[in-house]
Image (cartoon, rainbow, N blue to C red):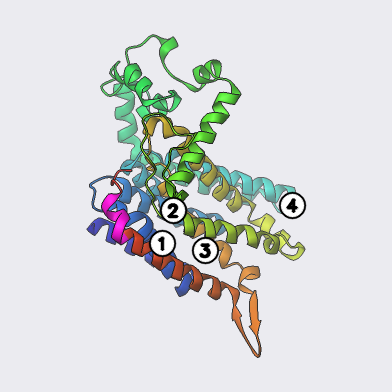
Amino acid sequence: MWLSLAILFALGTAFFVRFSILYAGYAILCISFLVFVLKSPTFKAEVLYYGLFALAFALSISNLQAPTWRKSAFVGLLFALAHFAKASALPALAIYAGSFAVQGVIQLLRKKQQLKRTLSLAAHALLGLFTFLALLFPYFQESYEKYDSHFYNVSTTFYFWYDSWAEAKAGTMAAGDRDGYPDLPPEEIPSLQKYLREHSWQEILKRLERGLVWLYELSCVLDRTPSQFRWAGDGPPGLLGYCHQVGAGLLLIAASLPLLLRRRALGELLDKGHIIFFVTVIFAVYTLSSAWYIPIGGTSTRQFLPLMAPFFCTLGLVMHSAPVQSLRLTLGDSSIKVFNLVFVLLGLILLDDILVVLTERAATVYGPK
């Protein structure tokens, strides 16, 4: 719990430096009581990973906006530390590096690109990758010596391509995948190619659909009756409580799009295309991966909850954009920022969510879930 408080203090500092006091206070309360309070009593890597991943996410956006050598190195450092805590940060780092390439392509198409600028962007991306690999080299090297792969991970290498946890236990786990490379014939080793050969596109899409529905039910469905999408043997969903605030945030982002897509703002939006790419792909990859892994991980949201703090960071960036901040509601001779009104109302709803968490969810939600 002390570790959770320390991480929340670091996240709070970042939010209060970047955003208004009203929004920063709201966002940190959401992160604290809808995610961390349910995880902090359990001795797991989750809260450490959530904090490091969120800080790496926020610093990545800052560096994509205005790259510096120090920030580029620290992005690699934070992603490396996050990967030490839970081996799930590598896709985010790859997306971050790819965002620099997207920036170069956009500037080239808009005829703003110069060779020196291109080389600078590539160097910033490579510095983050180099820092990440340098810090994790002993870990990767040991993995190679023991498993013949620098990036060996049973969950992503094997289990990800099974249809159920029972298959995983009877497959590579029974063949000793924790002690070395599993002793199985090559044709029995699960992989993307093997999965595509043995499954139709309809089955693949159905699995994603079922996983996404489960994630929705886990946070939003008040009726705990069994769902047609639920796997046999799975229990009823536990209400994690972030549905109201995340749902409202998604609606706010959607409502802000017409303002951001106005002709005057379109050029500025194109200049931020690489940041939009980074944020969009991060959320798409990690959400779909979490939904895909549901048949293996059961009712766990451990792959999905790391997106909570980055979500409120993204929402803050959208809500603090100039077009949104300029909206005002006139009442007689006075006017009030729509932004302030919206987040005061959401704060009142959040108080109810916090009350439910403290009186019910904190005592019933199993920590690792």
Q: CA distance from mark 1 to mark 3?
A: 13 Å
Marks 3 and 2 in Cβ contact (< 8 Å): no
Identify the element where label 4 is drawn.
loop
Q: Residues within 10 Å of mark 2 (few under 14, many from 20)?
A: some
Judging by the rendered image, the residue that carries numbered circle 3 is 316
Task: Characterize the local packing of mark 1: few (<14), some (14-19) or many (20 or more) Cα atoms within 10 angstroms.
Answer: many
Who's the residue at 68% across and 49% down the image? 106
Q: Residue 157's quadrant in the figure?
A: top left
Q: Secondary structure at mark 3?
A: helix
Q: Name the residue beneath numbered marker 1.
A: 30
* Camera-nearest residue between 144 and 226: 226
Name the residue carrying label 4. Answer: 110
Q: Are marks 4 and 1 in contact (CB under 8 Å)?
A: no
Nearest the camera: 125 or 216? 216
User: How far from the left and from the top, in percent, is residue 282?
Assistant: 52, 45
Give the CA distance from mark 3 to mark 4. 28 Å
Q: What's the residue at 23%, 57% (across, down)?
A: 1
Decide: marks 1, 2 in contact (CB < 8 A)? yes
**Helix, strand or loop status at disc 2:** helix
Can residue 314 be seen in the rendering of this structure?
Answer: yes
In terms of sequence position, does the residue under pointer 4 or pointer 1 come before the other? 1
Q: In the rendered structure, does residue 359 fall within the stretch colored magenta? A: yes
